Image (cartoon, rainbow, N blue to C red):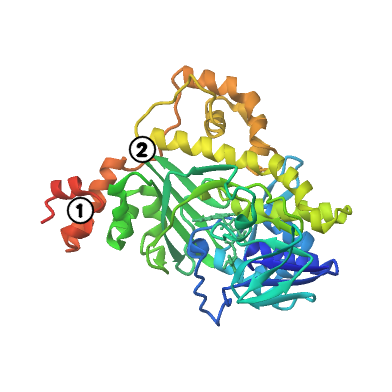
Amino acid sequence: MRTLIVGSGPTGLLLGAALARRGQRVVSVDRDPGPVGDAWNRRGVMQFEHAHGFRPQVPMALQAEWPEAHGSWTNLGAQPVEAPSSAGSRQVVGMLSRRSTFERALRHAAAKAPGLTLRRGHVEGLAIDGGRVVGARVDGSLVEADLVVDASGRAGRLGRSGTQSGEAALEGDCGLAYIDRTYRLRPGARPGPMVSPLAYMGDFDGYQCLVFLHEAGHFSVVIVRPTADAALKALRFEEAFEAACRAIPALAEWTHPARALPTSAVLVGGALRNVYRRQAGTPGLVAVGDSVATTTPTRGRGIAMACMQVTALLALLDEGADPVTVAEPFGTWCDHAIEPWVADHIAIDGGMVRRWQGEDLDLSIPLTTDLIADAVEADPRIGQHAGGYFAMTALPETLRPAEPLARTAYQDGWRPEYAPGPTRDELVGVILAAVLASGRRARDLTSTAPRQAAELGAR
Ligand SMILES: Cc1cc2nc3c(=O)[nH]c(=O)nc-3n(C[C@H](O)[C@H](O)[C@H](O)COP(=O)(O)OP(=O)(O)OC[C@H]3O[C@@H](n4cnc5c(N)ncnc54)[C@H](O)[C@@H]3O)c2cc1C
């Protein structure tokens, strides 16, 4: 078997290494040259510098399929996080790591993986002969293969041009945008407030804050704003972001200069979409990872879903599926195990954005899973249905039986409490005051928040 993988991101490398361990000759092509010493200007993968949390599916897949990469990751400092399981033993619930550290570890291990060749190049399109994919055009030349894997990520276009319709089966704007910055704890400083062993997450009136702890004291602070909220766009200015951090109590603790120092500029994320794409149905081609599904990043599901896909695809091949047509049973598995997460995110995000805009819950329609799960605070019986959903070991629909309990709580007037901190309007005041005090000119602001800028006296 000659396998050509388009994309040497997390999905392409994990699958490539696992296939090479099974004796296949694998070439993984990526236009990105990889790290050069400490520098890695990862163009085309905007999330490379953004905050990432790693669910347990990621270290589990590496340990099972590519232990050298797991070793390389921990050698670079990634820290497993353990918590007691219901059986009383301890289990890994995630890994503390920056995304860049994770990808470096994979690239490092891939360079030494027997049977896996990394090639730099731009894949321009698929080569199709007699109705099946027989390779791809890489920098003007044909590279023949028995199986082409589209692991080209959310921005890749390759397999999509080979699809019958080219359309996504499910698609929706997440309705939110990321602004984040990385920091590092000073030597000996303790992390700030957390709501889980991996992260802090706070819902505020009109926005959301996250802190992901990474390895060796590195951490990322994320402020999530509705895309439609133009005034909060000003968070992209460093003085605004820092003023917001000072005004939001949990972030103030994390980012206090006595505790931590920034290690990056303020990073602005690109457009975020929930997307599910079916397999193209062309023999010789299979799509995996973000090229199949992307979801709102706030719940840190992307790489876990990619690992779940790789594991399922390998299981099909191990059971004897023909690699040339494996996309068919794999697509059926994705429709069952991946698509529901995308549908779930589309429903959750729509509701969250409406609530951020001041709407109350609409109790005349089915409650979204986030609302059902949130109501565990009001009715602890919901917890017995929620464990698999939170861990992604059970599909979102497994929360549905708890809906009547949650509905009763909401009908009785219960609502999740906001985390302590400024409302959205107060936050706009804080950040615009900081921007104007910095001497930035009004025209920098007026495109984002003309009314507020005028109220604050921008000239
Ligand atoms: C802002 C943000 C935050 C996120 N946070 C989390 C998180 O906390 N936890 C989590 O699990 N997931 C998170 N995700 C999702 C996660 O980053 C993705 O699921 C992950 O990158 C998917 O890996 P991939 O290998 O499928 O795709 P990618 O990482 O996009 O890799 C695709 C590769 O293909 C290459 N490529 C594309 N087209 C071509 C071509 N034509 N020729 C050659 N090479 C090509 C690209 O250069 C790239 O290297 C986040 C995503 C975003 C956007």
Spot occupied by residue 24 in the image (x, y as percentages of width and height): 83, 69
Going by the image, does 288 lie left or right of 64?
Answer: left
Q: Quadrant of residue 322?
A: bottom right
Disc 2 Cβ-to-ligand 1 distance below 8 Å:
no
Element class at badge 2:
loop
Q: Which residue is mark 2?
A: 205
Q: Give the camera-side residue of 99 and 212.
A: 99
Can residue 99 be seen from the camera position used here? Answer: yes
Above/below status of 36 relative to 98 = below
* Residue for badge 1: 446
Which residue is pictured at 66% across the width and 54% down the height? 306
Q: Is 204 in front, or is 278?
A: 278
Left-right relation of 456 to 105: left
- The amino acid pointed to by label 1 is Thr
Task: Tell me what residue is drawn at x 65 percent, y 31 percent.
Answer: 397
Instruction: Give the farthest residue toward the bottom.
Output: 37
Q: Quadrant of the N terminus?
A: bottom right
- In the rendered structure, find residue 213 and report the number of the disc placed on it: none
Closer-to-camera residue (29/396): 29
Q: Position of residue 276 (x, y in %)?
A: 60, 46
Rounded to the nearest angstrom, the CA distance separating label 2 from label 1 is 24 Å
Which quadrant of the view contains residue 416?
top left
Ligand 1 in which quarter: bottom right
Residue located 41% across and 50% down the image: 177
Question: Residue 375 location, x and y as percent?
Answer: 53, 28
Give the residue type at disc 2: Asp
Q: Using the rendered image of the protein, determine whether residue 94 is visible from the camera's viewpoint.
A: no
Q: Tell me the quarter of the picture where residue 54 sits.
A: bottom right
